[in-house]
Image (spheres, rainbow, N blue to C red):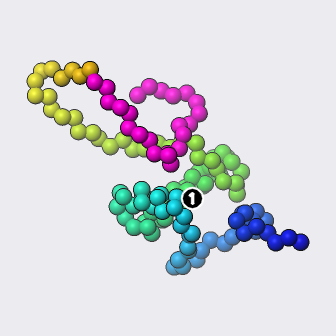
């Protein structure tokens, strides 16, 4: 019998979660390091980033299973998310009229790691 490919997931074997107090490890390639840099730029450590990410994904799984979105034991697929809107500061006008500008600003470039928008109806902002 041929030896199994170590890079392919083994779907026949269930892995036990790490025990409390242990230090699970993850192999970090360039993409994972880039993701850590993004998450950690808001403050915190790599451990904080891992704890937060695992908690978010576990909540998504629990919610999907509890609401029957997917069968228990099957990973739900995230299609959209909602972010909290932070209040913006509006500059005070110095006169009764706002200045008019004919110049259009170029759209900000979007990173290659951002997900595509969800399929379906979109509402204008």
Tell me, yes or no, whether the highlighted magenta stretch contains residue 8: no
Residue 91 rendering spot, x and y as whole percentages: 18, 34
The reply to whether residue 99 is visible in this rendering is: yes
Going by the image, does 87 lie left or right of 68? Answer: left
Instruction: List the single residue furthest toward the right.
Output: 1
Residue 67 rendering spot, x and y as whole percentages: 63, 47
The relative height of residue 49 versus residue 16 in the rendered view (above or below) is above
Q: Residue at x 66, y 45 (%)?
A: 69
Tell me, yes or no, whether the highlighted magenta stretch contains residue 111: yes
Q: Does the magenta stretch mainly form a helix, a strand or a loop?
A: loop
Foreground of the two, 76 or 28: 28
Foreground of the two, 57 or 98: 98
Q: Residue at x 47, y 27 (%)?
A: 123
Question: Residue tagged by mark 1?
Answer: 58
Report the span colored magenta. Answer: 103-125
Q: Residue at x 82, y 72 (%)?
A: 3
The relative height of residue 50 versus residue 85 in the rendered view (above or below) is below
Instruction: List the single residue furthest toward the left.
Output: 95
Q: Residue at x 34, y 61 (%)?
A: 43
Residue 107 rendering spot, x and y as whole percentages: 38, 33
Residue 108 rendering spot, x and y as whole percentages: 38, 38
Image quarter of residue 49: bottom left
């Amino acid at each position: 019998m041929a030896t199994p490919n170590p890079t392919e997931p083994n779907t026949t074997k269930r892995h036990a979660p790490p025990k409390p107090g242990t230090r699970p490890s993850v192999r970090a390639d360039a993409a994972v390091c880039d993701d850590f840099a993004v998450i950690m730029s808001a403050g915190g450590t790599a451990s904080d980033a891992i704890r937060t990410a695992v908690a978010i994904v576990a909540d998504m799984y629990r919610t999907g299973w509890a609401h029957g979105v997917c069968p228990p034991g099957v990973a739900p697929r995230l299609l959209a998310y909602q972010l909290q809107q932070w209040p913006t500061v509006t500059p005070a006008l110095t006169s009764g009229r706002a200045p008019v500008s004919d110049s259009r600003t170029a759209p900000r470039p979007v990173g290659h790691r951002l997900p595509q928008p969800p399929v379906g109806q979109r509402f204008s902002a």
